[in-house]
Image: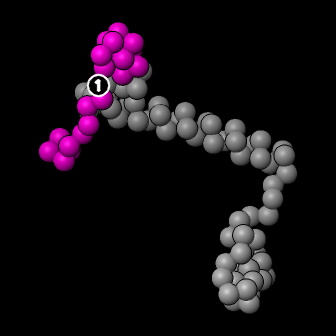
Amino acid sequence: RRERLLSSMNAVVEGGGPTVESILQKSLSQHQMKKNNELFCQATIRNQYFLDNVLKHCGAMTSQEVLRYRNEVEAFEVEWTTEDQI
């Protein structure tokens, strides 16, 4: 890992700026990309579940309740949060 870091630093110094290779990881295999995508999707679901529980605890509408409300009301307008409401 140290050698990789040093080689990427040399690429930055010699080239006059960062290169794509010095910033991004080496390309991942298809299997690894699929695994990372699955992990990302699972994390997104867990984050939404957590956020919905926080909203429910605060007495605010959860994401599911907002969707139901939007479907019931035709002229739904988004209400923006102001600094006073925070």
Residue at image coords 49%, 38%: 47
Give whichever of 57, 68 is nearer the camera: 68
Label 1 amino acid?
A: Glu
- Which quadrant: the N terminus? bottom right
Residue 8 seen: yes
In the figure, 49 relative to 12: above or below?
above
- The residue furthest top is 72
Give whichever of 43, 12 is nearer the camera: 12
- The residue furthest left is 84
Residue at image coords 63%, 42%: 40
Quick one: SS at disc 1?
loop
Q: Is residue 18 rendered magenta in the image? A: no
Colouring of the image:
one colour
Query: Which quadrant holds residue 68?
Result: top left
Q: Is residue 85 rendered magenta in the image? A: yes
Query: Which quadrant holds residue 62?
Result: top left
Residue at image coords 31%, 12%: 73
In the figure, 73 relative to 50: above or below?
above
Residue 2 seen: no
Give the percent coordinates (x, y) of residue 10: 74, 87
- From the viewer's perspective, tell me whether residue 81 is left or right of residue 21: left
Give the percent coordinates (x, y) of residue 65: 36, 19
Kindly identify which residue carries mark 1. Answer: 77
Question: How many numbered marks are there?
Answer: 1
Residue at image coords 81%, 55%: 28
Q: Which residues are magenta?
A: 66-86
